[in-house]
Image (cartoon, rainbow, N blue to C red):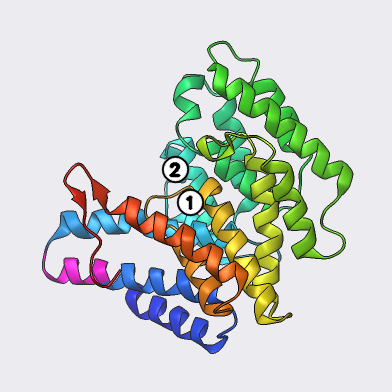
Amino acid sequence: QLANNSNELAAHGNVNKQNQNFQFVSKSLARDAQEILTWYELERYDEARFVLHNFTENCITCHSQHQDEKNFPGAQAFFKNVEIKKLPLVERAQIQIATRQFDDALKTYEEFFASEEFSPAQMALMDAFTDYLKVSIRVKNDVKRPVPVLEKWVKRPGVPEYMKSHINDWIIALKDIQKSNPYKGNALTNAKNLMKKAQTAPDVTLNRAKLVYFIAASGLLLDVVDSGKGDKTQFGEAYYLLGICESIVGRSFWISETEFFLEAAIRSAPGSQSAQKAYVLLEEQVVSEFSGSSGTHVPADM
């Protein structure tokens, strides 16, 4: 059922050729579901379980990109059959995002940030803040809610100095976005303005100090590419900028959209300035990905 339904979703994605992002994620979902089925039929249960464990990364990637407009009544029936309260808080929140229970996910993350199970140093390495901010900013369109949560967390004893710096930057950015309201007017222009603010820090590519600006910008850019309105040059530029954003805000090793966005920029507007810039970043991304101590080994298909 999982494989069949995932294929149906991928087929649905092919209907609207303009929405390349949905096509990419839905195909990834279908590919993973088929792999799970193949391993299962071969009685390779460890391999099947491994892919299944990461399968919901596709759901989280898609559901955390856009504003919350639809309820999912099936989630309540699902949770009746799952002992979700026994899950660690971060895993519980991820399941809630995957099943579109966004308000519950935010509450769970806030419970996690207030918990004593992990030290602040451990929490800083778990990417919980990234998911929390994505849901709050992109899905719930709420830049006020995270501020008191972050202000309280940063005062905990044992918070690493780099995280103190990041958190303070995030709070400033959240307040700035609340004041400037970039959600009115031209989405592409406003996204570029947010990214300019983010790129004022010379070391922005080395850390996530300006994470909030990139998340907010990516939300606007996703609206641009999913709207179907505009010419190919605008789509190409939006995808190129999304590639930059995703390289900063990407949260999963399982499904990375950086290369996809850069490729989409090239395919959307071949020969454009955005396409040329995107190719430079894409080439660097691929070469570095397949390079190591034994040299560079880029596969032929890549």
Does 11 appear above or below 3? below
First to last magenta residue range:
35-43
Residue flagged by tag 2: what amino acid is it?
A: Glu
Q: Main secondary structure of the magenta part?
A: helix
Say what secondary structure mark 2 lies in: helix
Cα–Cα span, label 2 and label 1: 6 Å
Report if residue 280 is visible in the image.
yes
Q: Position of residue 86 (x, y in %)?
A: 42, 38
Q: Residue at x 69, y 34 (%)?
A: 170
Does 199 appear above or below 220? above
Query: Does the magenta portion include 232?
Result: no
Q: Position of residue 135 (x, y in %)?
A: 63, 49
Of residues 196 and 208, the one nearer the viewer is 196
Q: Position of residue 19 (x, y in %)?
A: 58, 78
* Mark 1 Cα-neighbour bin, 10 Å: few <14, some 14–19, many ≥20: many
Q: Which of the labelled discs sits on residue 95, or is there none?
A: 1
Residue flagged by tag 1: what amino acid is it?
A: Ile
Say what secondary structure mark 1 lies in: helix
Q: Which of the labelled discs sits on residue 158, or is there none?
A: none
- Quadrant in which the N terminus is drawn: bottom left
Q: Residue at x 58, y 64 (%)?
A: 240
* Mark 2 Cα-neighbour bin, 10 Å: few <14, some 14–19, many ≥20: some
Q: Which of the labelled discs sits on residue 91, or is there none?
A: 2
Q: Quadrant of residue 65?
A: bottom right
Q: Quadrant of residue 32?
A: bottom left
**Is 277 on the left-hand or right-hand side of 170?**
left
| Cβ atoms at labels 2 and 1 below 8 Å apart | yes
Q: Looking at the image, which residue sits at the far top? A: 157
Of residues 282 and 18, the one nearer the viewer is 282
